[in-house]
Amino acid sequence: MIKPLSFYVDKIINDLKEKGKQSKQKGWAMSDIVQEVENQLGKDASELARKHMISDYESEYKRLNPVGWAKSQRLFPNK
């Protein structure tokens, strides 16, 4: 069974986010993820990845208040 492109894009995004959270920097860069998606799946997939990541960011920010969002992103781990 063939899966839609969005399935593979989401899988790569989630894998790279998890690797980023476990890294020394404790984070990830959207541009790095989009570039990796483009390397693996092509230009169309990278545009889909970018839109998907921005959409997730906006929906998560709306769901949480700014302080709750910052804590969920570990932007200020000492506070």
Image: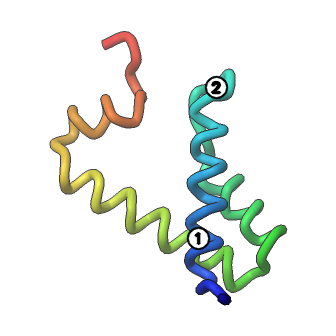
Q: Residue furthest right?
A: 39
Q: Amino acid at mark 2?
A: Gln
Badges 2 and 1: C-beta atoms under 8 Å apart? no
Give the x, y percent position of residue 75.
42, 29
Direction from residue 34 to residue 73 in the image, left or right: left
Measured from the top left, where is residue 5 in percent x and y?
A: 63, 83
Q: Which residue is mark 2?
A: 25
Residues under labels 2 and 1: Cα distance?
Answer: 22 Å
The residue sitting at 67% across, 89% down in the picture is 2
Q: How many marks?
A: 2
Residue 19 vertical position relative to residue 11 in the rendered view, above or below: above
Q: Which mark is residue 2?
A: none
Q: Secondary structure under badge 2?
A: loop
In the orientation shown, which residue stands out farthest toward the top? 78
Q: Is residue 46 above or below residue 60?
A: below
Residue under the point 59% across and 41% down: 18
Amino acid carrying label 1: it is Ala
Residue 71 in percent (x, y) is at: 31, 29
First-in-chain label (2 vs 1): 2
Mark sitting on residue 49 = 1
Query: Which quadrant of the rendered structure holds the N terminus?
Result: bottom right
Image coordinates for residue 57, horizontal then vertical, percent: 38, 57
Rendered image quadrant of residue 9:
bottom right
